Image (cartoon, rainbow, N blue to C red):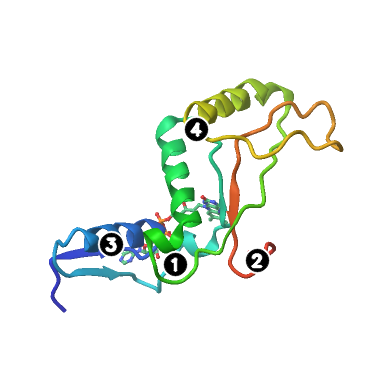
């Protein structure tokens, strides 16, 4: 089989690269994998997407990824991402609170807004509330 571009690895990264290349009219793009699609880590993910990270690049990538999952029809147009906004709560130990707060501040600065206020049942020691994140679950919320 001939192709102008061969992408090795049909996980989320390879599949995304192949999709973007195909859209850029670079010729035939061939996506290959030693196993099947999502046969590696991508098929084992918890399917949680979040914007709570310690660096700007990852936060921006995550935010963009969430936009694509949310507006799947506009961006991909085939199938269903299974995007389901369910929220995200991260409890941290006291010695990790400053780092967590810095991640929250970074998320805010990049436009990732929190989705909810502090749940009434939470203990006061949980001091850090991260920006909104979502789970993209296929089938049900409990699907692994
Ligand atoms: C248990 C678990 C839970 C996770 N949960 C989350 C989560 O909730 N949220 C999140 O954002 N991330 C999560 N992650 C991380 C996330 O799954 C990975 O970062 C992501 O899937 C990596 O994608 P990838 O395409 O780089 O790699 P992979 O999905 O591993 O794809 C690589 C592919 O390349 C193929 N390959 C490798 N070498 C060759 C070769 N020589 N020739 C042909 N094919 C080859 C493999 O077969 C594989 O299919 C989780 C990871 C694990 C393990």
The percent coordinates of residue 6 (x first, y second) are: 20, 65
Residue at 49%, 68% in the rendered image: 80
Q: Which residue is label 4 attached to?
A: 111
Q: CA distance from mark 2 to mark 4?
A: 29 Å
Disc 1 secondary structure class? loop
**Mark 2 vs 4, N-terminal side:** 4
Cβ of mark 1 under 8 A from ligand 1? yes
How crowded pointer 3 is (Cα within 10 Å; few <14, some 14-19, many 20+) is rated as many
**Mark 4 vs 3, N-terminal side:** 3
Q: CA distance from mark 1 to mark 4?
A: 30 Å
Q: Does residue 30 appear to the left or right of 131 in the view shown?
A: left
Location of residue 86 with respect to 25 vertically, above or below: above
Quarter of the image holding residue 31?
A: bottom left
Residue closest to the eye, 76 or 129: 76
Q: Which residue is label 1 attached to?
A: 38
Which residue appears farthest toward the front when viewing the image?
Answer: 74
Q: Quadrant of the N terminus?
A: bottom left
Disc 3 secondary structure class? helix
Q: Quadrant of the C terminus?
A: bottom right
Q: Is there a contact, CB below 8 Å, between mark 2 and mark 1? A: no
Please tell me the numbered disc located at residue 18. 3
Ligand 1 found in image quarter: bottom left
Give the foreground label among 2 and 1: 2
Cβ of mark 4 under 8 A from ligand 1? no
Disc 2 secondary structure class? loop
Q: CA distance from mark 2 to mark 1?
A: 16 Å
Give the foreground label among 4 and 3: 4
Location of residue 12 with respect to 139 vertically, above or below: above
């Amino acid at each position: 089989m001939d192709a102008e571009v061969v992408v090795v690895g049909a996980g989320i990264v390879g599949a995304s690269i192949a999709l973007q290349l195909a859209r850029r009219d670079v010729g035939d793009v061939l996506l290959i994998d030693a196993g099947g699609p999502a046969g590696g880590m991508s098929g084992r993910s918890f399917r949680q997407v979040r914007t709570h990270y310690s660096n700007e690049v990852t936060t921006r990538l995550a935010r963009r990824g969430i936009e694509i999952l949310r507006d799947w029809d506009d961006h991909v147009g085939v199938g269903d991402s299974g995007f389901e906004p369910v929220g995200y709560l991260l409890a941290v130990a006291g010695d990790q609170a400053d780092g967590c707060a810095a991640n929250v501040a970074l998320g805010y600065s990049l436009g990732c807004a929190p989705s909810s206020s502090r749940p009434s049942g939470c203990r006061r020691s949980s001091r850090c509330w991260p920006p909104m994140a979502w789970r993209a679950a296929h089938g049900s919320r409990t699907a692994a």
